[in-house]
């Protein structure tokens, strides 16, 4: 379908009118369809740019049939409509320009940048190392190996390095590939499907920076590990940057070639830990903002609640937020999201029965913050004014006495503090309760509120 820019604009305007009339919900239309436009028509594919990173997810999950129907009605063609955020468009165009000899489907995700990565005590070292590498690839910390449990930001940091290098030096040849895909590509090469070019030669000439994700998937693939060792040695010798991720420290990767373990450990090996409560809350705020939403539309105790309940990894946080947004758009439309709405929304994600009355660390922090006209993030953050310190110690005391949580875990909830700091905070409250009537009153009122 050959159309001018003007014609394409008119086509989409007609489609949007039909979508608007069919939806009969101005808020949904403004949130996910307003400011969208067709970037290109390529054969049977229509690329549509959205106004936020959340819009493609919501449109695909809820409004895909409606969109297809409106597009078919206006154009008379069954286009495959692909919704992408603005940052993804450039990547799509680059992929069309040139097909590499190997790893055709491998690419960097433009949304993974240092700016969108939330830094906390759990990941600060890894972030700083990644940032330095992006500025001087091949010069420092080569190779860099990041390891952690799933969903804690390894891939985000790794791809941030690649995106930053490309932005600084557009001609740099950066290859991001999952280890499992490396195995598949090696098998094709070994079986003769890639005879036109040597795999090792491809890495020598077409790769300046190698980002390989989940290296543990090479374990048990002897021939593949041998090939990877040759490639690794060639890249290292040429001073090209190598970044690796793993689910464990290389010492614990039983079955991985010993030569690879040795090479990995000769570089910089860093772990990423689970985020503390304050970092989890900041991640949520960042996700809300990047989705084109207003953080002020969420009660502070909702942020604290989600951060406390879904702090195992970032994917859990994203899943909880997505479920909450889906619920408030489709099941119970509301502009302002309260704890009542939040607990209703995530019933399917956790067994809560009634989490509004179920006691948790997050609920205690939220209650104490509300009592002293503070925010939960102030209690779990680094500020040490007398009022905030007092409220923080009371929250620690209540968590210890009402939930019997270990001091180590209490410290983690409060910005990654150590167990000794949490212990001292609890002891201060215990001593004050013996002679301070105002302290006793505050603690009694908070306990009563929390046990209703």
Image (cartoon, helix red, strand yellow):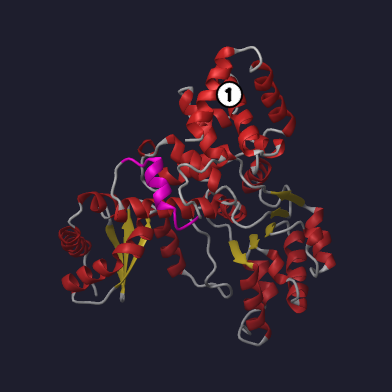
What segment carries the magenta color?
A: 336-350
Find residue 81 and report its horizontal and vertical position in percent: 31, 69
Q: Nearer the viewer, residue 75 or 402?
A: 402
Find residue 30 and report its horizontal and vertical position in percent: 25, 49
- Residue 419 belongs to magenta span: no
Mark 1, residue position: 383
Evaluate whether residue 156 shows in this view: yes
* Relative height, residue 249 to residue 100 (above, below): above
User: Residue at (77%, 69%) from the top-left corner?
Assistant: 229
- Residue 338 belongs to magenta span: yes
Q: Nearer the viewer, residue 140 or 180?
A: 180
User: Residue at (59%, 62%) from the top-left corner?
Assistant: 176
Q: Nearer the viewer, residue 7 or 179?
A: 179
Query: Few, some or many C-alpha atoms within 10 Å of disc 1 (few <14, some 14-19, many ≥20)?
Result: few
* Relative height, residue 327 to residue 175 (above, below): above
The reply, left or right, for residue 324 in relation to residue 361 is left
The reply, left or right, for residue 191 in relation to residue 88 is right
User: Quarter of the image containing the N terminus?
Assistant: bottom left
């Amino acid at each position: 379908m050959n159309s001018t820019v003007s014609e394409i604009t008119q086509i989409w305007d007609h489609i949007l009118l039909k979508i608007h009339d069919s939806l009969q919900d101005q808020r949904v239309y403004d949130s996910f369809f307003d400011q969208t436009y067709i970037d290109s028509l390529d054969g049977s594919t229509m690329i549509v740019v959205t106004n936020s990173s959340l819009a493609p997810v919501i449109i695909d999950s809820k409004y895909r049939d409606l969109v297809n129907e409106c597009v078919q009605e206006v154009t008379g063609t069954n286009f495959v409509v692909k919704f992408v955020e603005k940052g993804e468009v450039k990547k799509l165009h680059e992929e069309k320009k040139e097909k590499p000899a190997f790893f055709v489907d491998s690419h960097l995700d433009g949304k993974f940048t240092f700016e969108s990565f939330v830094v906390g005590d759990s990941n600060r070292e890894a972030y700083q190392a990644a940032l330095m590498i992006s500025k001087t690839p091949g010069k420092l910390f080569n190779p860099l190996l990041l390891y952690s449990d799933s969903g804690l930001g390894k891939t985000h940091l790794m791809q941030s390095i690649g995106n930053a290098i490309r932005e600084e030096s557009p001609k740099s040849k950066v290859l991001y590939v999952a280890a499992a895909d490396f195995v598949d590509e090696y098998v094709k090469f070994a079986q003769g499907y890639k005879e036109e070019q040597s795999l090792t030669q491809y890495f020598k000439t077409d790769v300046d920076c190698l980002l390989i994700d989940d290296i543990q998937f090479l374990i048990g693939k002897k021939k593949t590990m041998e090939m990877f060792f040759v490639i690794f040695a060639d890249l290292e010798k040429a001073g090209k940057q190598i970044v690796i991720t793993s689910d464990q420290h290389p010492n614990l990767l039983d079955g991985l070639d010993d030569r690879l373990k040795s090479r990995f450990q000769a570089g910089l090996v860093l772990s990423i830990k689970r985020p503390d409560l304050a970092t989890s809350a900041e991640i949520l705020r960042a996700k809300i903002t990047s989705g084109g939403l207003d953080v002020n539309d969420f009660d502070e105790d909702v942020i604290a609640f989600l951060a406390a309940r879904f702090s195992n990894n970032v994917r859990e946080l994203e899943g909880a937020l997505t479920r909450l947004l889906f619920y408030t758009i489709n099941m119970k439309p509301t502009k302002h999201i309260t704890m009542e709405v939040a607990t209703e929304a995530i019933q399917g994600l956790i067994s809560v029965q009634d989490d509004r009355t179920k006691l948790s660390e997050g609920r205690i922090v939220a209650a104490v913050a509300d009592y002293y006209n503070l925010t939960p993030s102030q209690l779990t953050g680094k500020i040490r004014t007398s009022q905030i310190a007092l409220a923080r110690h009371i929250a620690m005391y209540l968590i210890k006495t009402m939930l019997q949580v270990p001091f180590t875990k209490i410290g983690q909830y409060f910005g990654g503090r150590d167990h000794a700091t949490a212990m001292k905070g609890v002891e201060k409250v215990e001593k004050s309760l013996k002679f301070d009537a105002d302290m006793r009153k505050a603690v009694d009122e908070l306990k009563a509120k929390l046990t209703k």
